Image (tube, rainbow, N blue to C red):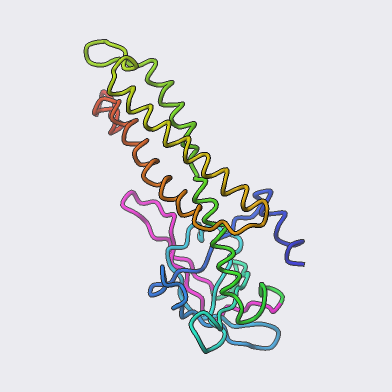
């Protein structure tokens, strides 16, 4: 029933979801979460606070981890689905220095979640969460940015650019070597991503290859952006026009 209700709108993009996992005192140490779900007639009442939740201010639903039992830290955690318009949910956007917000604080005060929105077993949510995070790592490993295409775009841009002396940038040996280096690393990242996707498609655990993909992706994207900006005059970097 959960698959029939939720999967199609996710695949078609009709509904946006967010992830209510991290808390002020439970980020990388997720098992220390304190949000609590108490059993009531027909469902659960949830109280707690989540933070650094991407897109909570526009999401229709969320996946939520809450503590439902005692015992060892990784036990007694349950995985819930929760509509973001449920009574008792307050979303507070966390604006960055430009005034925009992607991350949010989310407060849950006596939020009712029916029994049919529990995923997996009660007190068995840690296993579900680890499965969720494993496939999240697949997305991170493959990257939100197509690094190989980004290098191709840079090469295309360089073809029409000249230096201060009017010489084509594409003839500069330093720039050519930098492009070759970036392209080689982007190709390696692409192949790692294909390996991760193959493992996931065959129901195999993504394993350490996802971590390798992330290690490749993050610095590579940063370096691609820095290199592309370095090709522009200072005014281009800051988006200045003639009247600025």
Question: Residue 35: horizontal and vertical position, in percent?
Answer: 49, 79
Q: Which quadrant of the figure contains the C terminus?
A: top left
Relative to 233, does residue 140 appear above or below in the rendering?
below
Q: Is residue 15 above or below residue 155?
A: below
Q: Is residue 146 covered in magenta?
A: no
| Left or right of 124 on screen, residue 34 | left
Residue at x 53% of width, y 40% of height: 191
Q: Position of residue 240 (x, y in %)?
A: 28, 29
**Residues drawn in magenta:** 89-115
Estimate the x, y position of residue 208 in percent, counting from the top left: 49, 57
The residue closer to the viewer here, 207 or 60, is 207
Which residue corresponds to the image point at 59% horizontal and 78% vertical from the top-left? 78
Relative placement, left or right, of 126 versus 102 is right
Q: Is residue 153 above or below residue 172?
A: below
Instruction: Say whether residue 92 is magenta.
Output: yes
Tally of numbered tags: 0
94 or 203, nearer to the observer: 203
Which image quarter: residue 59?
Answer: bottom right
Q: Quadrant of residue 159?
A: top left
The residue at the far top in this view is: 166
Q: What's the residue at 52%, 82% (across, down)?
A: 36
**Picture quarter with the N terminus:** bottom right
Q: Nearer the viewer, residue 95 or 185?
A: 185
State the predominant SS element of the stretch in magenta: strand
Q: Position of residue 161 (x, y in %)?
A: 34, 16
């Amino acid at each position: 029933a959960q698959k029939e209700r939720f999967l199609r709108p996710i695949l078609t993009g009709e509904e946006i979801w967010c992830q209510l996992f991290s808390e002020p005192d439970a980020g990388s140490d997720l098992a220390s979460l304190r949000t609590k779900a108490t059993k009531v007639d027909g469902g659960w009442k949830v109280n707690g606070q989540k933070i650094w939740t991407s897109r909570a201010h526009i999401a229709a639903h969320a996946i939520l981890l809450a503590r439902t039992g005692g015992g060892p830290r990784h036990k007694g955690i349950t995985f819930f689905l929760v509509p973001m318009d449920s009574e008792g949910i307050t979303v507070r956007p966390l604006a960055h220095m430009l005034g925009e917000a992607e991350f949010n604080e989310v407060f849950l005060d006596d939020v009712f979640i029916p029994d049919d929105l529990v995923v997996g077993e009660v007190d068995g949510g840690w296993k579900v969460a680890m499965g969720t995070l494993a496939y999240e790592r697949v997305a991170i490993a493959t990257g939100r940015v197509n690094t190989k295409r980004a290098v191709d775009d840079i090469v295309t841009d360089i073809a029409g650019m000249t230096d201060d002396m009017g010489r084509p940038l594409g003839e500069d040996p330093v720039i050519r070597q930098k492009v070759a280096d970036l392209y080689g690393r982007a190709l390696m990242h692409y192949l790692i991503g294909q390996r991760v996707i193959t493992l996931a498609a065959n129901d195999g655990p993504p394993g350490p290859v996802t971590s390798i993909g992330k290690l490749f992706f993050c610095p590579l994207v940063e370096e691609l952006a820095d290199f592309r900006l370095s090709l522009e005059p200072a005014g281009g970097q800051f988006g200045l026009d003639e009247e600025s």
